[in-house]
Image (cartoon, rainbow, N blue to C red):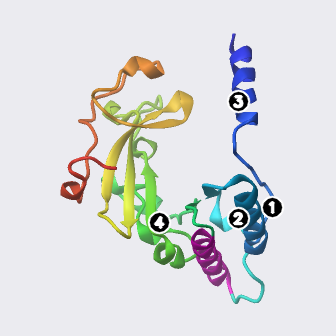
């Protein structure tokens, strides 16, 4: 029963305007050249880098931090040149795992790995945080606090032209999918009940958003 649906979905994706380049250690020059061509031929609308630390920076830099800094600034320059947003994923340091209590695992700007330039160059920095990953469990692997099941947050750590804060999400583990949580959503849409997290909520800057996160 699943195979026909899988084949149908694969057919749709094969014709989608998505271009994947898995060149290992791609350089800024290579990415810029390919992005320019796609912009010219297909009106490129978005670039996603997964992830920034896998790219290769220019030669002649003294250390890895400088290399990542050059990559970060190069991506910023590319976004301005082509007039398209660049979404760059980044690794984090081990610092979040060393925190304690409710903050265990919670990321912050200083956790961005290998370069402070990422924090400086980015217009918006967002983190996804799932407290249930770091929460205490019993001997059977069940959460001691079952209310954390499916609970997630999108944390806006930086926004150059707006407020920062966080909004609650729901994580559908079976689909590896994050959704904006709303009490108006029908839990049956995704095959499971959603716990009541109280709806979207900004920790800081709620007045600027009128009470909604985006």
The front one of 12 and 70 is: 12
The front one of 184 and 197 is: 184
* Mark 1 crowd level (few <14, some 14–19, many ≥20, 10 Å Cα): few
- Give the x, y percent position of residue 41: 76, 56
Residue labelled with disc 2 = 54
* Mark 2 crowd level (few <14, some 14–19, many ≥20, 10 Å Cα): some
The front one of 40 and 135 is: 40
Which residue corresponds to the image point at 63% horizontal and 58% vertical from the top-left? 47
Residue labelled with disc 3 = 12
Which residue corresponds to the image point at 80% horizontal and 61% vertical from the top-left? 24
Q: In the picture, which quadrant includes the N terminus?
A: top right
Q: CA distance from mark 4 to mark 3?
A: 41 Å
Do callouts 1 and 2 mark residues in contact (Cβ within 8 Å)? yes
Q: Nearer the viewer, mark 4 or mark 1?
A: 1
| Mark number displayed over residue 24 | 1
Q: Nearer the viewer, mark 1 or mark 3?
A: 3
Residue labelled with disc 4 = 95
Q: Residue furthest left?
A: 207
- Give the x, y percent position of residue 19: 73, 49
Do callouts 1 and 3 mark residues in contact (Cβ within 8 Å)? no
Q: Earlier in the sequence, mark 1 or mark 2?
A: 1
Q: Nearer the viewer, mark 4 or mark 3?
A: 3
Mark 3: secondary structure: helix
Q: CA distance from mark 4 to mark 2?
A: 20 Å
- Give the x, y percent position of residue 48: 62, 56
Q: Nearer the viewer, mark 4 or mark 2?
A: 2
Q: CA distance from mark 4 to mark 1?
A: 28 Å
Numbered marks: total: 4
Q: Earlier in the sequence, mark 1 or mark 3?
A: 3
Does the segment drawn in magenta span residue 191? no
Q: Earlier in the sequence, mark 4 or mark 1?
A: 1
> What span is in magenta?
63-81
């Amino acid at each position: 029963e699943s195979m026909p649906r899988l084949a149908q979905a694969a057919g749709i994706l094969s014709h989608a305007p998505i271009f994947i380049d898995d060149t290992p250690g791609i350089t800024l020059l290579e990415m810029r050249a390919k992005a320019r061509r796609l912009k010219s031929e297909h009106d490129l609308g978005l670039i996603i880098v997964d992830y920034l630390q896998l790219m290769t920076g220019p030669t002649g830099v003294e250390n890895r931090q400088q290399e990542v800094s050059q990559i970060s600034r190069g991506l910023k320059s590319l976004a301005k040149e082509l007039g398209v947003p660049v979404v760059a994923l980044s690794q984090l340091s081990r610092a979040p795992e060393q925190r304690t209590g409710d903050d265990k695992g919670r990321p912050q700007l200083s956790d961005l790995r290998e370069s402070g330039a990422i924090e400086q160059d980015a217009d918006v920095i967002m983190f996804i945080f799932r407290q249930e990953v770091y929460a205490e469990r019993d001997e059977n692997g069940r959460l001691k606090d079952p209310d954390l099941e499916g609970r997630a947050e999108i944390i806006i750590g930086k926004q150059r032209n707006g407020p920062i804060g966080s909004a609650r999400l729901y994580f559908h583990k079976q689909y590896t999918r994050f959704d904006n949580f709303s009490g108006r959503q029908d839990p049956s849409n995704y095959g499971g009940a959603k716990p009541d997290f109280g709806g979207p909520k900004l920790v800081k800057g709620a007045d600027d958003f009128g009470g909604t996160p985006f």
